[in-house]
Image: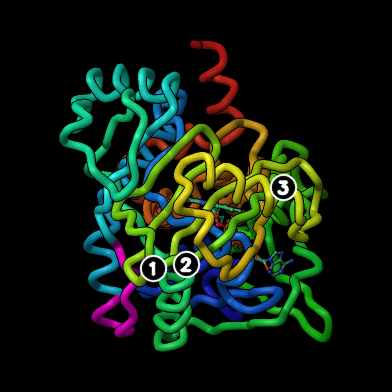
Amino acid sequence: MSDFDYIVVGGGIIGMMTARELDIQGARVAIFEHKTLGMETSWAAGGILSSMRPWAESFDSMVLSEHGKALYPYYLELLKQETEIDSEYIQSGLIIIDEAHSSKIKNWASNGNIALIEDKKNISCGISLPKHSVLLPDIAQLRPPRLLKALSKSLKQSSVSIYENTKITNLVTKNNRFQFVEFTGGKVSADAVIITAGVWSQSLVSNLSKDISVKPIRGQMLCVKADEIIIDKMILDGAHYLIPRKDGHILIGSTMEDVGFNNETTKSARQELLDWAYSISPVFSKAKPVSHWSGLRPQSITGKPFIGKMPSFKNIYINAGHFRKGILQAPASAKLIVDCVFGKTSFMDIENFNMEGFKKTLEFS
Ligand SMILES: Cc1cc2nc3c(=O)[nH]c(=O)nc-3n(C[C@H](O)[C@H](O)[C@H](O)COP(=O)(O)OP(=O)(O)OC[C@H]3O[C@@H](n4cnc5c(N)ncnc54)[C@H](O)[C@@H]3O)c2cc1C
């Protein structure tokens, strides 16, 4: 008999939500994390619960995002009751201020019946805004470090076996079946394994499939504080955005850098983010930088995450490559993969998230 029913490799938001869902379904689960649960890319995220360019999203990705958005309020309420940690979910709304972006958003919102406020008289947020600004009032945010702390606490209170500071070095298979994971000093077996290792997923499965291609795109973020700045809505301007938190901290994001697995912060990025914030409002000259960090977004070659069973293997699954939407899509993505593992019908067809589904989409587009 195997040591566990399921092994989850990688303890970011995707891995922790996947392990939690498996545990809720009554499975015997182990999660392996190279470092500390939740301290890599997921920790670095801003926590905006929306796609940045929803009009350009594929249909499948949009359904996953919308399902994630719908699951969050109840999910976070349960997690708060369980752990007494508040992830600070707030429906603060998102203002889009650049002209090209706001006109695309207007079309997208009217086609999809999405609430949108165009009249500037009805949009206030504490700083003056360009005339073509539009507000999506229903967009919410949460604080990823708090959510990750809550998920880690929830798993530690559950019957999931947690192996932190343990890097999986190899997945051992026989006759196209997964047998056990290897790490320095040991091996653990399970009936199936689920890879949730973000940007590191490709290297874990490279000898099993050439189809899984996920590359890192670095994002740097600044956190500032100034008592004079009172912004109560998120502001989006191209790739840059502001996220105001309840305690007066404001996040200034973010960069998009193709620099491999280098997650250092740089002076030039810090200056780029501060210059952009000053350009939005001179009040930012009074802001004190509190912290500066970076994370590696897992960008998949298909433009949507890989979710499902690995081709040619009976019991190896993957849930990785969520790029800029991993926080938004995590609860839906965990539900979809766990439904697949248990052979249940889910809220959408998981086949859309494998390489074959991607090729099919290309054929019909
Ligand atoms: C600056 C920035 C801002 C962002 N803002 C948003 C946002 O506002 N909204 C949104 O939805 N998304 C946002 N994202 C994207 C989001 O953060 C990611 O899509 C998401 O965190 C990916 O989660 P993950 O669990 O796949 O990866 P990770 O959090 O990186 O987790 C993977 C884990 O696997 C572990 N691991 C790797 N290899 C092994 C191994 N061999 N053995 C054991 N463990 C291993 C790693 O240590 C890591 O902890 C942002 C990202 C960045 C960088």
Question: In the rendered structure, are the residues bearing label 1 and label 2 in contact, judged by CB atoms less than 8 Å apart?
Answer: yes
The residue tagged 1 is 227
The residue nearer to you, when weighing 125 against 328, is 125
- Mark 1, secondary structure of its residue: loop
- Please, is residue 199 above or below residue 55 in the view? below
| Quarter of the image with the N terminus in it | bottom right
Q: Residue furthest left?
A: 122
Residue 64 in percent (x, y) is at: 39, 41
Read off the residue under disc 2. Answer: 225
Q: To which residue does mark 3 refer? A: 216
Q: Reading the chain from its start, which is encountered first: label 2 or label 3?
A: 3
C-alpha gap between disc 1 and disc 2: 7 Å
Dot 3 crowding, Cα within 10 Å, few <14, some 14–19, many 20+: many
Helix, strand or loop status at disc 2:
strand
Which residue: 42% across, 73% down? Answer: 146
Tags 1 and 3 touching, CB below 8 Å: no
| Label 2 neighbour load within 10 Å: few <14, some 14-19, many 20+ | some
* 156 lies above or below 108: below
Q: From the viewer's perspective, is 247 left or right of 282? A: left
Stretch in magenta = 80-89
Disc 1 residue type (three-letter): Asp
Locate residue 177 relative to residue 85 in the image: left or right: right
* Circles 2, 3 touching at the beta carbon (< 8 Å): no
The three-letter amino acid code for the residue at tag 2 is Lys
Residue at (70, 49) in percent of width and height = 269
What residue is rendered at 41% in x and 70% in y?
A: 147
